[in-house]
Image (cartoon, rainbow, N blue to C red):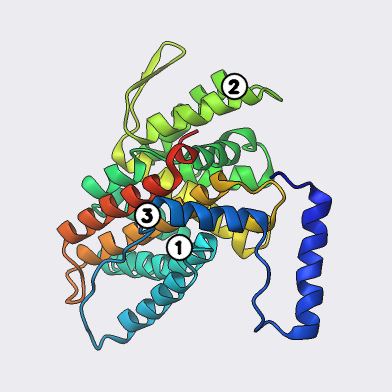
Amino acid sequence: MMRDRSYHRYERIRIIEEWSRTGVLAERRRLPIEEQFRERLDGTGARLFMPVSLTYSDDSWYNTQISYLLEAYDALPNRPDIAFDSTWKVFESTATRTARMRSGSAHKITQSLTYLSEHVALDGAVLDSLLGDLPSQTCEYLFKKIITHAADGDGQRVRGRLTGVNDRKDATGARIKDFLTLVEGKYLVPADVDANRKGAMLLRRALAGETLSIEGVEVTLPEKARLRILMSGLLYTARNERYHGEAFSPFYSSAATLRTYTHPHYLFLSTYALVHLMWSRSGESFGPSEKAVERNVIDNFGEAKKLYGRHWTR
């Protein structure tokens, strides 16, 4: 049943008011969308998520990362957004460590992500699984960030991370810039929801590696460009919004539906997969096999689509 904003605003305050008397050890009442998600989870029989089996190691860095992965698992199944937050910590630490070890010098996270997309092999079956069929809500989110709001201050920073505006030798950035210019020309229509949605679905196809014809121009995004858009455009932007409190916590919103769960679930799954792909190619003793990671990614995305059904792509 649909609830209006005033209902949710009242419920959020009422939850806090009850806890002010009982303490937070008392389990709060679930919001309507939380009940609907639980019913969906029970009804589909989906396993939701299975972690990659890992090996024991005394390495202190590795064990720190394991602690954050356990923190992420503890947030499931109800809060994939919080699972993403915890997994991001592992991803950021792994990304900067990998870039430093490969390049011989330290990088900030934004520089590390650019370096990884250019110089570290994160392609193949895992990348194809991650980008082969993004949730519609994720595509719409990405369209807003890199197309609709590109002229805003935050939007300009996102575009800068993708296009490498200050580096004329950045061939990948130039390819992304040309692609985004074509998408803007056709789908950036103010207040036209249908045009924006079509543009978002075009992003899905481009990130899947399809060759597209946009205004008579054929475009195929290379793997390096697709990976940069995933890491520097989607994941890093979503992390920043949550870290700085710029986005509404998704499941306390009056607009939340089952479809709302697909976006943070995708953020979590893709970040988790990239972490383990980097570990599998690190040469470290604790790294899982690449085949194990590939199988895990396929299995986890299969479980997600089983759970969400049409909500994943509509």
Res. 209 image quadrant = top left
Which residue position is annotated with label 1? Answer: 109
Q: In this view, does 166 lie above or below 23?
A: above
Which residue position is annotated with label 3? Answer: 46
The spot of residue 290 in percent (x, y) is 17, 59
Q: Which amino acid does label 3 sit on?
A: Ala
Using residue 236 as the reference point, say whether residue 118 is left or right of it.
Answer: left
Placement of the N terminus among the 4 image quadrants = top right
Mark 3 neighbour density, 10 Å: few (under 14) some (14–19) many (20 or more): some
Label 2 or label 3, whichever lies nearer to me, is: 3
Can residue 151 be spotted in the picture?
yes
Q: In this view, does 177 lie above or below 107?
A: above
The spot of residue 279 in percent (x, y) is 25, 67
Decide which of tag 2 and tag 1 comes sooner along the chain: 1
Q: What residue type is labelled 2?
A: Ala
Q: Residue 195 carries which label?
A: 2
